[in-house]
Image (cartoon, rainbow, N blue to C red):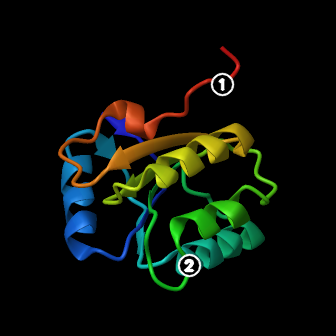
Amino acid sequence: MKKVNSLFIVDDDPITVFGIKKMLKPICDCDDIQIFENGKEAIDALKNRIELGDTIPEVIFLDINMPIMDGWDFLEEFILLDLQERVTINMITSSIDPLDYQKWNEFKVKCPHSLNYRNKPIFKIEISDLESIDLAS
């Protein structure tokens, strides 16, 4: 079982949130799972944690299409944060638009964190979804 100190699920679909939490139980030990319905709530909470010196999430499950602030806008702000820690971000989407996958590839190049792409519905979460990939190798 993978120990994760903090994890964010940023998705406006309660069924997806429920499913992710259920799939995490057998593979992840985490006492700090925070749920946000849009990117604005999540980025504000993250900035607040940084300001207070609290633990930032090691793993983020991030929906692309959400109201108020979508996943792409969240990522734009997120990569500007001065973070020493590497975060594993799992982009999750029900979109079949090839431009979303292309945009993810563009973000992968400029994002200093591990960035995965998953289509909904998610049927299984793997340990690899919780770990950063060493980009240097």
Q: Quadrant of residue 78?
A: bottom right
Residue 123 vs residue 65: left or right?
A: left
Image location of residue 32, percent across then percent down: 43, 61
Image location of residue 62, percent across then percent down: 46, 60
Q: Tell me if mark 1 has few (under 14), some (14-19) or many (20+) residues whose alpha carbon lies within 10 angstroms of its own.
A: few
Image location of residue 92, percent across then percent down: 38, 55
Determine contact: label 1, label 2, CB under 8 Å: no
Which image quarter is the N terminus in?
A: top left
Residue under label 1, please give it: 135
Disc 2 element: loop
Q: Work out whether residue 61 or residue 98 is closer to the camera in this orientation and state it.
A: 98
Disc 1 element: loop
Query: In the image, which disc is placed on residue 69?
Result: 2
Query: In the image, which disc is placed on residue 38?
Result: none
The image shows residue 28, relative to residue 100, as above or below, that is: above
User: How many circles with numbers are drawn on the protein?
Assistant: 2
Q: Work out whether residue 49 or residue 108 is closer to the camera in this orientation and state it.
A: 108
Residue positioned 66% across, 25% down in the render: 135
Image location of residue 85, percent across then percent down: 69, 44
Q: Between disc 1 and disc 2, whose residue precedes? A: 2
